Image: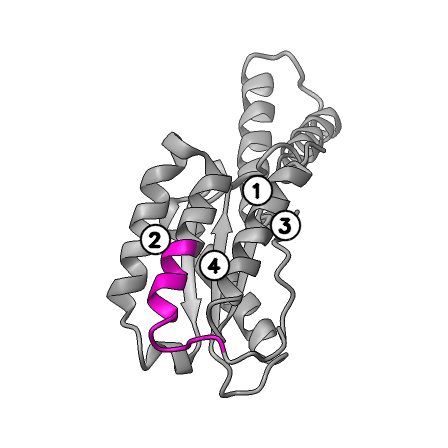
């Protein structure tokens, strides 16, 4: 499997996070996901449909007329299609966009919940979540941050990040986004000299 990032890419994002947390008491975490879901149920449905179509065409054209063999063909096609989630970026390209967005958003929220349980409730926390297969970016602030900084300000950071990825690449775009987030956080949550509660290393998720 090809790595999503080189070690240099990971180090660049981790360093940007470390520098950010030297200026603010907020905890910043960046998660890069290869895909937010493997979409097994959708892929199996597509496999069943394609397998049935292939078997039907073979039967209509009298290439295969014995039903046991047609069943074998159908199962073989389903098996081949079922491998798609484990190749490249998986089967996300087969899934309707609104479902991809929904699954990526849900995964971002799940990761945020996991992070928020690791720190006191009054600690400002900000998650930058990027899902490559879904072409999806989300910034998830906790309630402490949300009370001070509006969603529209975070949406602006997201828009700038997504617009710059093709020009600057994902790593530099994430670094720029972290810098922009820091500028928003510092006036409200300046560094208080406290220890970092969450790791500054970028988290790269395979699935």
Instruction: Say what secondary structure mark 3 lies in.
Output: strand
**Which residues fall within the magenta stretch?**
179-191
Residue at image position (51%, 80%) is 192
Is the residue under label 4 in contact with that under label 2 (CB below 8 Å)?
no
- Residue ID for mark 2: 158
Q: Is residue 35 above or below residue 52?
A: below
Q: Where is residue 91? Give x, y as percent.
A: 55, 38
Q: Nearer the viewer, residue 114 or 14?
A: 14
Chain-order first, disc 4 or disc 1 = 1
Residue 173 vertical position relative to residue 88 in the rendered view, above or below: below
Q: Position of residue 127 (x, y in %)?
A: 49, 64
Q: Earlier in the sequence, mark 1 or mark 2?
A: 1
Secondary structure of the residue carrying tag 1 is helix
Marks 1/3 in contact by CB < 8 Å: the verdict is no
What is the distance, in whole Å, between disc 1 and disc 3 at their CAs? Answer: 24 Å
Q: What is the spatial separation of the Cα atoms under label 4 and label 3, in whole angstroms?
A: 12 Å
In the rendered view, does 138 fall on the left or right side of 207?
left
Distance between the alpha carbons at the discs numbered 4 and 1: 28 Å
> Is the residue under label 2 in contact with that under label 1 (CB below 8 Å)?
no
Q: Are marks 4 and 1 in contact (CB under 8 Å)?
A: no
- Circle 4 is placed at which residue position? 128
Left or right for 82, reference 30? right
Q: Splitting the image into 4 quarters, where does residue 199 fall?
A: bottom right
Quickly name the residue at label 3.
204
User: Is residue 186 on the magenta stretch?
Assistant: yes
Q: Secondary structure at mark 2?
A: helix
């Amino acid at each position: 499997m090809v790595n999503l990032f080189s070690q240099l890419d990971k180090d660049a994002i981790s360093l940007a996070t470390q520098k950010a947390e030297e200026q603010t008491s907020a905890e910043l975490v960046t998660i890069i996901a290869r895909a937010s879901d493997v979409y097994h149920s959708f892929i199996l449905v597509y496999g069943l449909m394609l397998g049935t179509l292939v078997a039907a065409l073979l039967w209509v054209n009298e290439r295969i007329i014995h039903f046991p063999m047609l069943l074998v063909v159908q199962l073989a096609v389903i098996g081949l299609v079922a491998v798609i989630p484990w190749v490249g970026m998986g089967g996300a390209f087969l899934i309707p966009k609104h479902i991809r967005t929904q699954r990526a958003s849900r995964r971002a929220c799940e990761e945020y919940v996991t992070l928020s349980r690791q720190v006191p409730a009054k600690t400002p926390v900000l998650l930058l979540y990027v899902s490559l297969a879904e072409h999806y970016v989300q910034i998830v602030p906790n309630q402490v941050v949300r009370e001070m900084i509006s969603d529209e300000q975070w949406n602006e950071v997201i828009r700038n990040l997504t617009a710059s990825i093709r020009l600057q690449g994902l790593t530099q775009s994430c670094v720029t986004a972290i810098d922009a987030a820091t500028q928003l956080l510092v006036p409200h949550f300046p560094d208080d000299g406290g220890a970092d509660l969450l790791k500054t290393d970028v988290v790269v998720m395979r699935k």
